[in-house]
Image: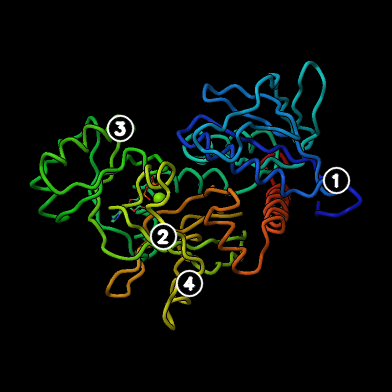
Amino acid sequence: MTVNKKQKITVAVLMGGQSSEHEISLISACNVISAMDPAKYEIIPLGITRGGEWLLQDREKPAINETDPKTVQLSPGGKRVSFFPGDGTASFKVDGQTLGPIDCVFPVLHGPKGEDGTIQGMLKLSGIPFVGCDVLSSAACMDKDITKRLLSQAGIKNAEYLIAEKDGPDLHFKDAEESLGTPMFIKPANQGSSIGVFKVRTEEEFENGMKQAFKFDTKLVVERGVEGREIECSVLGNTRPVASLPGELILSDDFYSFETKYISPDGAKLQIPAELKDGELSALQKTAIEAYKALECSGLARVDFFLTEEKEWVVNEINTLPGFTAISMYPQMWEASGISYPELIDQLIELALTRFEVISQLKSAND
Ligand SMILES: Nc1ncnc2c1ncn2[C@@H]1O[C@H](COP(=O)(O)OP(=O)(O)O)[C@@H](O)[C@H]1O
Ligand SMILES: [Mg+2]
């Protein structure tokens, strides 16, 4: 199915979710909904509470305080949704009334249980096309250890690291310092929004960082601190992905922490497009696409880099459902590259439908 004017496409927009990025997801989703052309799309906003309940939200007002990351929340009074999976006829019901059939789901969810392959698995099993990376790439990009293994296998530079597991042998400061130097970055393998990320220099900071980070995950990544500019690149596409102009995070804080991201955003300035010298742009875009392919991404992803003094592009991480507010890097980098926010949404839905069609046409064991 293609986006056309005769037939409206019914899109369920998932918003909120169970991760620490619930609020950002609400803001992202409100932006997505208001940018979707009502002549093209029938929109069904579905809120997911922190506890995991699915609620039908009002199309006109899916969330309240939708511009404030501190107070935004799902509009109250949403009714519980039941879900009827099925190839081509999947639907949601509220009070016995059918919403759908659903042509496509747009999971505007960030972090665990949204960006990590779990929702994607549910949708895939239910026979519903969905925007963004498939199950494998969503899960692989969520786990920073797996991401790094696949990047290294493809010959793409990323920060040297060690793994610490809750039930594994203790990682001692002296050993970590010897192989990685200081500062080091301690991170839960599966998180986002800089939650549980610690920049450490001393043994005391290291021990405390490890203890705190283990509260969020049973596996930690301990990385060598990379000195360099933080530059991000948007990638879009299925089999022939394209890379946008990059954006740079200019930080006045120590690193891009949770506080800098959401509480005191004055600590970071976005420079779009980033200022690069001749040759740097093409090397960045090439590496971004290589990283996207190495992780088998489809639909979209934002590839985050450090550009070192030695002019090396070091991949920090790949976000498969990056922030999607009107002021977020991902859509802004496309805007600077000539694709408007509403056009970007059209392309993402088109890519979701195309991927679904390609997979549906494959021969199955029952054919
Ligand atoms: N190895 C590193 N060297 C230097 N800075 C880092 C390193 N790892 C993370 N950071 C800083 O910490 C921030 C958050 O880390 P990141 O890996 O992006 O976690 P998240 O997935 O939570 O965004 C980065 O944006 C960067 O400012
Ligand atoms: Mg990050």
Confirm or reject: label 2 Cβ below 8 Å from ligand 1.
yes
Circle 1 — which element? loop
Mark 2–mark 4 distance (CA, rounded to whole Å): 20 Å
Pointer 2: what residue? 249
- Which kind of residue does numbered mark 1 sit on? Lys
Pointer 3: what residue? 218
Q: Residue at x 71, y 33 (%)?
A: 61
For marks 3 and 1, the one nearer the N-term is: 1
Q: Are the two marked residues, 1 and 2, in contact with CB atoms closer than 8 angstroms? A: no
- Which kind of residue does numbered mark 2 sit on? Leu
Q: Which of marks 1 and 4 is in front?
A: 1
Mark 3–mark 2 distance (CA, rounded to whole Å): 30 Å
For marks 4 and 3, the one nearer the N-term is: 3
Instruction: Return the mark for residue 145.
Output: none
Mark 3–mark 1 distance (CA, rounded to whole Å): 45 Å
Circle 2 — which element? strand
Residue 246's spot in the image, x, y percent? 49, 67
- Which kind of residue does numbered mark 4 sit on? Lys
Instruction: Return the mark for residue 8.
Output: 1
Q: Nearer the viewer, mark 3 or mark 2?
A: 2
Pointer 4: what residue? 286
Q: Nearer the viewer, mark 1 or mark 2?
A: 2
Q: Which residue is drawn at 19% across and 46% down?
A: 200
- Classed neighbour count for the residue bearing mark 2: other residues with Cα under 10 Å, few (<14), some (14–19), many (≥20): some
For marks 1 and 4, the one nearer the N-term is: 1
Q: Are the two marked residues, 4 and 3, in contact with CB atoms closer than 8 angstroms? A: no
Residue sticking out furthest to the top: 95
The reply, left or right, for residue 227 in relation to residue 351 is left
- Check the image and report above or below for 38 versus 78: below
